[in-house]
Image (cartoon, rainbow, N blue to C red):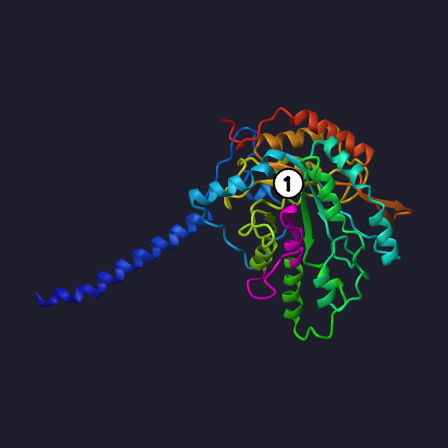
Amino acid sequence: MKYKFYYIPLVLNVFFCFLLLSFLGCNKGEQNKSYKPFFLLNPPDSITPEKTLYSNGWEPTPVIPPKHWTKKEHKELEKKLEWFHNAKYGLFFHFLAPEEGMNIDRWNAMVDSVDVEKFADQVKEAGAGYIILTIGQDQLYSCAPNPVLERLWELTPGSYISRRDLPLDLFNALNKRGIKMMLYLSMNNQFKLPRPATFKKETDRFENWLKVIEYYSTYYGERCVGWWIDALDEDWTTNYRFRVHEYLKRGNPNAITASASYGLSEYTHGHCEASWDLQQKVRKPYFGRWEPRYGIQWHVLQYLGRDWAKTDTAHSTASIVKYAVDVIRGGGVITFDIGTEVYINNKHVNTLLEIPKGQMIQLLAVKNAVQTIEPSDGSGN
């Protein structure tokens, strides 16, 4: 009888090995979990959730894992996104200063020239439920006030920021027409600004940029219902990506945000492919409204011109309409990037905030085609 105790360590070792293998097996199964697409949109063979998103980027490091939503939390998310989903589509405007020969006087003239009432009428005519406006992108100049930025970067007031508060004027015009306003923010603007001597450590810049973000959020408050965040690729300082999303909600906790970190986002950023053929084939919500790994709203951002902010029409109206119809039938939301840049001799010389004629024709065709489509989860039920 005394010998039976010698077997206890052996039994325990076997037991713990079994638990370890089970745990590893569960993790592996979670990583390789297969998702079945809905058949409403006739998915191509071997389609995966990853393929329905941007194939060339961006994978922030480290990857933030999906949030595990409770039923109650996801119901709250669904309610928060209801206006976005019901809108079906919106318009994105790169309102940016040309890179060559710019000064604040030229920039002020461009910003002052925007007729917000005419612009809002165009957006209403196009049937869009929202717009997204850039407040800077990898450049010095901005159309949105931020005294915190000017103070922290030790800038002379009005040296890079327009005297007109364009987002506020746009909100007032759009709001009268029942159209919502979202804003685009790039993390890269901070690298373009001259670095003050008071920024002793590299992290000083990033920490101060959070204060800039907080000002935008609290200043525009509930007037801004969502943010599209660019170049948020890594944690340059402690929990940076998490804090960027958090600070952008301080003025409006119900604002929806999207960045390359889907584990922090409420909708997919939807960056489009350079290939229109590839875009039409794989970039659709084949798995329905909710991106299956992250549980957030499937969304795509597609330019109508040959590239971002270009004023031409690069694709046939029929193909644009079919693509938009498929996205919306599948439970997704689509944002069209609209041309704003004026070129002379291949140089960007001016920026306008209006919808080019050819692109308006395509948007009206989309409007007519999707107006009877009811927002759904994309399952076809």
The secondary element bearing badge 1 is classed as strand
Q: Does the magenta stretch include residue 110?
A: no
Q: Which residue in the structure is indicated by mark 1?
A: 300
Q: In the image, is residue 108 above or below residue 157?
A: above
Could you say where residue 299 lies in the image, as x and y percent from the top left? 61, 40
**Residue depicted at x 42% and y 48%:** 29
- Residue 102 in view: no
Q: Where is residue 75 in the image (x, y as percent from the top left)?
A: 47, 40
Neighbours of disc 1 within 10 Å: few (<14), some (14-19), many (20+): many
Residue in the foreground of this view, choosing between 50 and 115: 115
Taking the spot 47% from the left edge, 43% from the top edge, the residue there is 74
Placement of 349 over or under 187, stated as above or below: above
Left-right relation of 58 to 149? left
Going by the picture, which residue comes out furthest to the right?
345
Check residue 228 for magenta coloring.
yes
Please, what is the three-letter code of the amino acid marked with disc 1? Answer: Val
Left or right: residue 38 versus residue 175 is: left
Question: Looking at the picture, how far across and down is residue 136, in whole percent?
Answer: 74, 54
Question: Left or right: where does residue 343 sit relative to residue 381?
Answer: right
In the foreground, 199 or 215: 215
Residue 296 seen anywhere in this rendered image of the structure: yes
Q: Give the range drawn in magenta.
A: 215-240
Q: Residue at x 81, y 60 (%)?
A: 158
From the viewer's perspective, tell me whether residue 163 is left or right of residue 68: right
